[in-house]
Amino acid sequence: MAKLRQIFMTAGDMARWFAAVEEKLGWKIKFVPYGPFDAPQPEFANCLDIPNFGVSASGDERHKRHYFIVPATANVVQEPFRLNNGQMRCTVNPQANSGMVGFDPSGVCAPTHVVTGEFDTALTDEGSVTLDKALSQVLRKQCTISGTAAVGAEALELHRAGYRLNDRLAAHPASDLVIRGLGKRAAAPGRGTRGGSKRRTNG
């Protein structure tokens, strides 16, 4: 079974995902921006409180803000550091914290695309592994799965209506994630398949 990493989801899809994860774990989570920043950043107890959550204004996943998902009770260390020009910045250092999973939100770029998001962790502490596992397990129950990508219910309806699933507007349509059986378009001949769907490749 491929490890889930990519998500195509609306704000509503992601809110339901995290609510189900909290129910599964029996504890709350929060979201901490990953920098660097000029000053320590506010933490968010609810993903829907994050400004412009679930919206991709640029249509390019490289322009999204990055977050860590952590237990709500975690005391997250935001460390200061000095740039070469002497200016001070602060950031969340994963090595100074534990129980963290990196998260880049998916976003809708109306009226044409749902831009990919991602989640993953390189940490091996019990908290990080448990959270990462719960995130994946809930996705498999709530979403349509294609290889390493999960498509939320609302995002799937947008896809049915013609929205493309990719990481940026400029990507070639041949690199879109295409889910078989939706009656949207046929998969290109000769492209590899897994789990009944054509795998996405970056354009």
Image: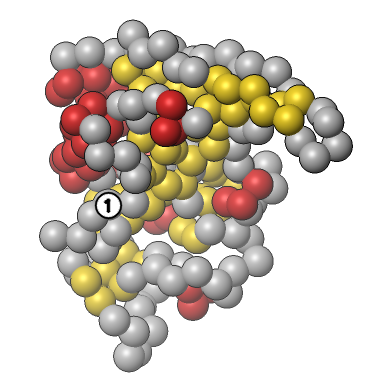
Residue 131 seen in render = no
User: Which residue is situated farthest in the right direction here?
Assistant: 85
Q: Is residue 181 toward the left or the right of residue 186 in the image? A: left
Quadrant of the rendered image containing residue 125: top left
- Disc 1 marks which residue? 4
What residue do we see at 59% from left, 69% from top? 171
Residue 30 seen in render = yes
Helix, strand or loop for disc 1:
loop
Quadrant of the rendered image containing residue 31: top left
What residue do we see at 17% from left, 21% from top? 25
Q: Is residue 146 toward the left or the right of residue 159 in the image? A: left
Q: Is residue 23 toward the left or the right of residue 69 in the image? A: left
In this rendered view, identify the residue nearer to me: 103 or 182: 103
x and y percentages locating residue 100 in the rendered image:
36, 30
In this rendered view, identify the residue nearer to me: 185 or 26: 26
Q: Is residue 10 toward the left or the right of residue 72 in the image? A: right
